[in-house]
Image: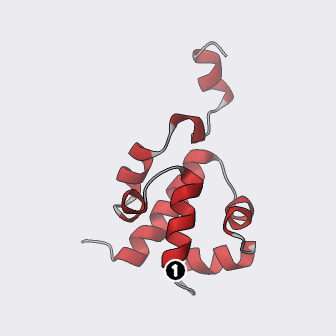
């Protein structure tokens, strides 16, 4: 079964938030929205806008097309410095 574009975008945003260690509150701040507005977009009660997509893409350092291509493509395009690293990963990397 194939996801629709809106559902795919919600999933992509959730995956990027997880990958970067960000909360809805921090994403809201980057977009100039409230945490409640992000929650409504993520639950599907309100749709993401094209302006949101452009701003999200810039925030994560990916293109809008990467963001709309789904979670795998968006995560592959995510710059390494935007990725959340755990203490165990940092220890393995010798940081």
Answer above or below: position of 50 versus 45: above
Pointer 1: what residue?
49
Query: Closer to the camera, 44 or 47?
Result: 47
Left or right of 6? Residue 87 is right
Above or below 87: residue 77: below
The residue lying furthest to the left in this view is 1
Binning the other alpha carbons within 10 Å of mark 1 as few (below 14), some (14 to 19) or many (20 upward) gives few
Which residue reaches farthest bottom?
Answer: 45
User: Left of 8 or right of it: where is 23?
Assistant: right
Measuring 54% from the left and 75% from the top, which residue is drawn there? Answer: 51
Q: Quadrant of the C terminus?
A: top right
Residue at (61%, 39%) from the top-left corner?
84
Q: Position of residue 45 (x, y in %)?
A: 57, 87
77 relative to 91, above or below? below
Q: Residue at x 42, y 77 (%)?
A: 6
Left or right of residue 31, residue 1 in this image:
left
């Amino acid at each position: 079964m194939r996801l629709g574009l809106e559902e795919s975008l919600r999933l992509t945003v959730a995956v990027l938030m997880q990958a970067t260690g960000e909360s809805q509150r921090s994403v809201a701040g980057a977009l100039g929205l409230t945490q409640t507005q992000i929650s409504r977009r993520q639950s599907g009660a309100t749709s993401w806008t094209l302006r949101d997509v452009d701003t999200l893409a810039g925030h994560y350092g990916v293109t809008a097309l990467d963001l709309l291509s789904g979670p795998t493509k968006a995560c592959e395009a995510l710059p390494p410095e935007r990725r959340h690293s755990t203490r165990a990963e940092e220890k393995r990397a010798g940081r």
